[in-house]
């Protein structure tokens, strides 16, 4: 089995050409002709990820966040890319195309939280979010439910109302409070919410839940690993949830 076999399968489900213009998904490091030993699936490609791949004899890493995002001006022995090439490890990254796609990050997040009647919502730039429904809950109860589902810390604004309909955006999506208001929804669940967004949300009478960038996106690792394992039964796929980002 070759790297290109994995990439072709993922690109068929989550085409790289559907990613947002600023993005950089695809086969980013290594040769598509490399024969695969084992595969590590992770949110990010860090030095820790590379070490875990080496320990598990993985020569392919599949990530959500692109290992190469901005233009590279050098590849030194202190860089991730250098370490990957040195250890003959390829990397496939699927980013905003995986966020938006069926069974992708936003769908995985909705399922993990326990939302029902999931529907797609497209913003003005073509990014596809999700909206969903829950049994009516006060904000503090929903925050607890999100925390228990995702395992991280949850920061939220309380509008004093029961929440029934929510807009969901994995990762950084605080600016979608305006879309949530426009759609007549009760709340936005996302991450990386700035203070001014919480303030604006209060003025808009919208509840906002910041569940952390890592925790709102790491939900895709296990489903993606399962998907690949079911397709390529002769390979070993390993989920990696390691992060140095901690919360109390």
Image (cartoon, rainbow, N blue to C red):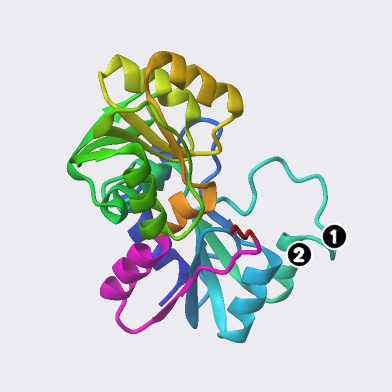
User: Which mark is drawn over residue 82?
Assistant: 2
User: Which mark is drawn over residue 142?
Assistant: none
Say if mark 1 contacts mark 2, CB within 8 Å.
yes
Residue 112 against residue 160 in the figure, above or below: below
Which residue lies at the image location 84% right of the left edge and 65% below the top edge? 77
Which residue lies at the image location 26% right of the left edge and 47% below the top edge? 102
> Separation of disc 1 and disc 2 at Cα?
6 Å
- Residue 109 picture location, percent across and down: 34, 50
Label 1 packing within 10 angstroms: few (<14), some (14-19), many (20+)? few
- Left or right: residue 121 versus residue 202 is left
Assign a secondary structure to mark 1: loop
- Magenta residues span 220-244
Q: Nearer the viewer, residue 46 or 241?
A: 241
User: Would residue 236 be counted in the magenta stretch?
Assistant: yes
Residue picked out by circle 1: 76
Residue 88 against residue 117 in the figure, above or below: below
User: Would residue 7 be counted in the magenta stretch?
Assistant: no
Residue 35 against residue 189 in the figure, above or below: below
Label 2 packing within 10 angstroms: few (<14), some (14-19), many (20+)? some
Which residue lies at the image location 53% right of the left edge and 20% below the top edge? 199
Assign a secondary structure to mark 2: helix
Which residue lies at the image location 68% right of the left edge and 40% below the top edge? 70
Q: Quadrant location of residue 73?
A: top right
Q: Nearer the viewer, residue 130 or 56?
A: 130
- Residue 214 picture location, percent across and down: 53, 53
- Residue 202 picture location, percent across and down: 45, 20
**Which residue, as the protein is rendered here, is positioned at the far left?**
117
Res. 213 in view: yes
Q: Quadrant location of residue 90?
A: bottom right
- Residue 216 picture location, percent across and down: 44, 50
Q: Nearer the viewer, residue 113 or 45?
A: 113
- Left or right: residue 81 versus residue 98 is right
């Amino acid at each position: 089995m070759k790297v290109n076999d994995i990439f072709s399968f993922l690109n068929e489900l989550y085409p790289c050409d559907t990613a947002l213009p600023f993005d950089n998904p695809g086969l980013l490091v290594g040769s598509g002709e490399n024969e695969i030993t084992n595969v590590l699936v992770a949110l990010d490609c860090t030095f820790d990820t590379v070490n875990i791949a080496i320990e598990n004899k993985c020569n392919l890493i599949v990530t959500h966040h692109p290992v190469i995002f901005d233009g590279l001006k050098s590849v030194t022995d202190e860089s991730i890319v250098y370490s990957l090439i040195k250890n003959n490890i390829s990397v496939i990254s699927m980013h905003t195309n995986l966020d938006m796609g069926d069974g992708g990050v936003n769908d995985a997040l909705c399922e993990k939280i326990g939302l029902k009647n999931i529907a797609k919502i497209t913003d003005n730039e073509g990014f596809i979010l999700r909206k969903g429904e829950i049994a009516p809950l006060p904000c503090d109860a929903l925050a607890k439910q999100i925390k228990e589902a995702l395992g991280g810390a949850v920061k939220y604004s309380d509008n004093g109302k029961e929440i029934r309909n929510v807009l969901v955006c994995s990762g950084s999506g605080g600016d979608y409070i305006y879309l949530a208001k426009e759609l007549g929804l009760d709340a936005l669940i996302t991450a990386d919410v700035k203070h001014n967004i919480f303030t604006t949300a209060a003025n808009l009478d919208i509840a906002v839940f910041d569940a952390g960038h890592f925790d709102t996106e790491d939900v895709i690792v296990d489903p993606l690993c399962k998907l690949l394992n079911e397709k390529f039964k002769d390979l070993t796929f390993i989920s990696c949830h390691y992060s140095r980002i901690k919360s109390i």
